[in-house]
């Protein structure tokens, strides 16, 4: 692999928050065939950093996020988070509790149309007793994502970028161990995509949030701290992005890697 440095501890970053070892995942398809989504994937995700998972459609990006987030179970291998959470060995109840500690952001926002922005943010807390006031926390998060004053707005009154900001605030409601974002800019124009990426990087800088982004957009990937490239369900390289580089320099350097 071209970047052995990145495979162990990219850029000399903090110890890994997520360790994936030998993970494979297969799906049966109609007609009796089998699709291999992940094949013997091993990697380490540094804590307090933004890591991009890149690759063409069908390469296994989303499946990897789903396995790390305990939304899917691999056929082989293990996932350990924060040093002592063996995700792949959790019971059904333990997986539910674990998912409460993970923030999820999706391409299609998944906001509830009948709820205001503030209520959408607080919605993950509704079945539980929180140690803080959900409404107050929702308003704080709205301000943090640049939407102060829009607490009562319904999703239909918000732009796509604003809806994604609400979705990110919702993902942060429980101060998550890890934020998983699956193509978070996929439905947005380039300017709004840049704004959402600015927001995610600010969460890293201000809160030390560990963020894992599945994206097919090389410009989004170039702004992350580490880039993991997947092809046909396999990790082909893991590249540390130099903070001193411009996006253009990063893209040019990445283009030279030929697994």
Image (spheres, rainbow, N blue to C red):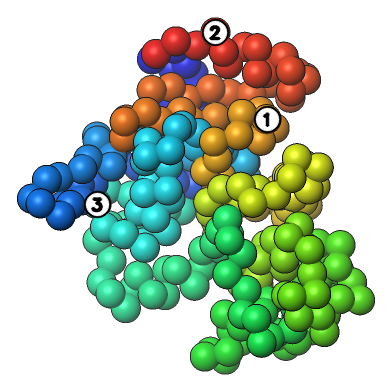
Dot placed on the residue nearer the N-terminal end, 1 or 2: 1
30 vs 100, nearest the viewer: 30
Q: In which quarter of the image is residue 140?
A: bottom right
Above or below, comparing residue 73 to residue 19 in the picture: below
Label 1 – label 2 distance at C-alpha: 16 Å
Q: How far apart are marks 2 and 3 (CA)?
A: 32 Å
Earlier in the chain: of badge 3 and badge 1, it is 3
Q: Look at mark 2 in the image and give the residue it sits on.
A: 256
Residue 201 visible in the displayed image:
no
Residue name at image x 43 percent, y 22 percent: 237
Q: State if disc 1 and disc 3 touch (CB < 8 Å).
A: no
Residue 215 lies, in percent from the top left, at 55, 40
Look at discs 2 and 3 and give the one toward the viewer.
2
Label 1: state its secondary structure: helix
Residue at horizontal 37 percent and vertical 28 percent from the top: 231
Q: Name the residue that disc number 3 marks.
A: 74
Q: Quadrant of the N terminus?
A: top left
**Is 216 on the left or on the right of 245, as rendered?**
left
Circles 1 and 2, Cβ within 8 Å, touching? The answer is no
Secondary structure type for disc 2: loop
Badge 1: residue crowd in 10 Å (few <14, some 14–19, many ≥20): some
How many numbered marks does the figure carry?
3
State the residue position of label 1.
219
Report the residue at 37% width, 39% height from top.
Answer: 58
The quarter holding residue 160 reads bottom right
Give the secondary structure at mark 3.
loop
Is residue 219 visible to us here? yes
Quarter of the image with the C terminus in it: top left
Left or right, 120 with respect to 141, comes to left
| Residue sitting farthest toward the front | 31
Measured Cα–Cα span from mark 3 to mark 1: 30 Å
**Circle 3 or circle 1, nearest the eye:** 1
């Amino acid at each position: 692999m071209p970047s052995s440095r990145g495979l162990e501890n990219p850029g000399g970053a903090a110890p890994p928050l997520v360790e994936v070892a030998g993970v494979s995942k297969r799906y049966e398809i109609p007609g009796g065939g089998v699709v291999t989504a992940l094949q013997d994937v091993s990697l380490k995700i540094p804590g307090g950093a933004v890591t991009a998972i890149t690759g063409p459609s069908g390469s296994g990006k989303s499946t990897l996020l789903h396995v790390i987030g305990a939304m899917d179970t691999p056929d082989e291998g293990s996932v350990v988070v924060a040093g002592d959470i063996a995700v792949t060995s959790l019971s059904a109840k333990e997986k539910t509790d674990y998912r409460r500690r993970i923030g999820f952001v999706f391409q299609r926002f998944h906001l509830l149309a009948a709820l205001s922005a503030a209520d959408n943010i607080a919605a993950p807390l509704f079945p539980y007793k929180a140690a803080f006031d959900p409404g107050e926390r929702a308003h704080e998060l709205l301000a943090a994502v640049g939407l102060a004053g829009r607490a009562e707005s319904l999703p239909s009154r918000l732009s796509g970028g604003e809806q994604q900001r609400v979705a990110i605030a919702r993902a942060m409601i429980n101060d998550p161990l890890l934020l998983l974002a699956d193509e978070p800019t996929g439905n947005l124009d380039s300017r709004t995509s840049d704004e959402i990426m600015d927001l995610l990087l600010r969460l890293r800088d201000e809160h030390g949030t560990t963020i894992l982004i599945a994206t097919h957009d090389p410009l989004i990937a170039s702004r992350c701290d580490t880039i993991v490239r997947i092809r046909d369900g396999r990790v082909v390289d893991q590249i540390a992005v130099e903070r001193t580089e411009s996006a253009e320099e990063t893209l040019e350097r990445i283009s030279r890697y030929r697994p």
